[in-house]
Image (cartoon, grey):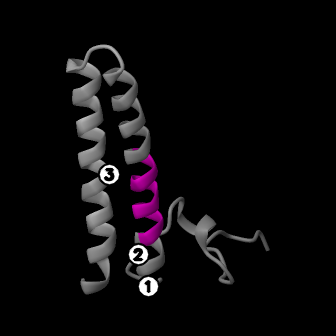
Amino acid sequence: MENLRGPLYLDVAAKGLSLAGVVMMVFGQGGWFTVGLSLVFIGVLIGACAMVAVRRVRSPGPARPTLFGSWGRRGGSSDEDTGS
């Protein structure tokens, strides 16, 4: 769990920026809408970086389910019948 501390901080920062941006867009007047929009955009980019960082930190193993079943397997045989 020590390795996930950095991505956790990135995730918290992304959500905080996005929330601050939404508040600025709702309650701000004039140019503050544009500032809020840019904060939300930056928050989404940081959130994407956090997701990529978590994917790189995790070790691949059997405990992690694959999306769409056997499509995500690399170098292994699929569970489907080959029709012989």
Q: Quadrant of the C terminus?
A: bottom right
Q: Which residues are magenta?
A: 44-53
Residue position for label 3: 14
Residue 47 lies in quadrant: bottom left
The amino acid marked with disc number 2 is Arg
Q: Say whether residue 45 is visible.
A: yes
| Residue 31 point in image, percent of width and height | 36, 20
Vertical relation: 61 (above or below) 48: below
Main SS of residues in magenta: helix
Q: Residue at x 29, y 23 (%)?
A: 25
Between disc 3 and disc 2, whose residue precedes? 3
Question: Which dot marks residue 41?
Answer: none
Foreground pick, 52 / 71: 52
Residue position for label 2: 64
CA distance separating discs 3 and 1? 24 Å
Q: Helix or strand or loop: what does disc 3 sit on?
A: helix
Q: Helix or strand or loop: what does disc 1 sit on?
A: loop
Q: Quadrant of the N terminus?
A: bottom left
CA distance separating discs 2 and 1? 9 Å
Residue position for label 1: 59
The amino acid marked with disc number 3 is Ala
Query: Is residue 68 found left or right of 75 in the rendered image?
Result: left
Vertical relation: 6 (above or below) 69: below
Residue 18 lies in quadrant: top left
| Residue 70 point in image, percent of width and height | 59, 68
The amino acid marked with disc number 1 is Ser
Q: Residue at x 27, y 14 (%)?
A: 29
Q: Helix or strand or loop: what does disc 2 sit on?
A: loop
Foreground pick, 52 / 84: 52
